[in-house]
Image (cartoon, rainbow, N blue to C red):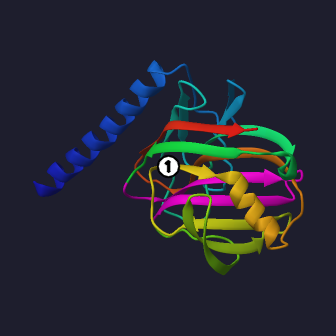
Amino acid sequence: MHNVVRTLLVSLTAAAAVATTASAAEAAAWSSSDKWATWSNGGYTVRNDVWGSGAGPQTIWANSYSNWGVWADHPNTGGIKSYPHSAKNVGRTIGSLHQVSSTFTVTRPGSGAYETAYDIWANNNAYEIMLWVNKQGPVGPLGTKQTTVTVGGHTWDVYRGSNGSNEVFSFLRTSDANTGTVDILAVMNWIKSRGWFGDVTLGEVQFGFEITSSAGGMNFAANTYSVTAS
């Protein structure tokens, strides 16, 4: 009897999650379950970006570049499965910029394995700068820890490494945040002050959820997100 009740509860929970996702997707301005789906809005590009091996289904929806989300059902296995995100291309050298800042507010699950992160690209993707504003489960950055620093309005543990095609600088916020403002230019200038790169050209500033596992189906949402560059 207990097993029957438990099975029924699991089924009902899964059905509710799917129903919630279906409602959000149906009500949204755009949605797709295509793993490479993209949508342009307000000078930004929203991408589903299901790129890792062994990935499960994922549906993305968006009302705007600033308000979007996904329902993802990726198995409890290692390796990144997807990075749904919204991206703004800047296309200027950091020395020519006076301001690059971003605000975010997210709603995220309390289980699974993922991080909410900026993925920032420079010099035609020669450099990758990741800013982890929160994380859940057994996930960790590439490379080795260099230092802990307060810059850009937050305190981070800083890691440096390479994935074989580009250098990667990962900044992990020392405490999780679901809302905030990041001074991205200050972070870029701090890296430059260390001699890790020069006056690089800032490309895309992406923000989203790098998901390793979300078994059973989980909802992730960016309630607000924007980038200001001048």
| Residue at 62% in and 58% down | 152
Question: Can you say whether 217 is above or below 60 in the image?
Answer: below
- Which of the 4 quarters of the picture holds residue 147? bottom right
Type of residue at label 1? Gly
Quick check: can you spot residue 167?
yes
Q: Main secondary structure of the magenta part?
A: strand
From the top left corner, tell me how far across and down residue 175 is, in percent: 45, 66
Image quadrant containing the N terminus? bottom left
Residue 131 located within the stretch drawn in magenta: yes
Residue placed under numbered mark 1 in the picture: 180
Q: Tag count in the figure?
A: 1
Quarter of the image for residue 43 reads: top right
Residue at the left extreme of this rendering = 1
Q: Is residue 192 left or right of residue 223?
A: right
Was residue 142 drawn as part of the magenta stretch in this picture?
no
Q: Is disc 1 placed on a helix, strand or loop?
A: strand
Looking at the rendered image, the quarter that the C terminus falls into is: top right
- Measured as percent of width and height from the top left, residue 59 is found at 53, 35
User: How would you rate the neighbour count of disc 1 (Cα within 10 Å): few for under 14, some for 14-19, many for 20 or more?
Assistant: some
In depth, the one of 52 and 116 nearer the eye is 116
Picture residue at 21% right of the left edge, 45% below the top: 8
Q: Residue at x 58, y 33 (%)?
A: 33
Viewer-nearest residue: 3 or 155: 155
What segment carries the magenta color? 110-136
- 211 or 170, nearer to the observer: 170
Image check: 41 left or right of 5? Answer: right
Residue 55 visible in the shown view = no
- Taking the spot 67% from the left edge, 43% from the top edge, the residue there is 49
Query: Residue 97: horizontal and vertical position, in percent?
Result: 81, 45
- Position of residue 160 measured from the top left corner of the image (x, y, whole percent): 73, 74
What is the residue that sits farthest to the front in this orientation?
Answer: 98
Q: Is residue 143 above or below residue 202?
A: below
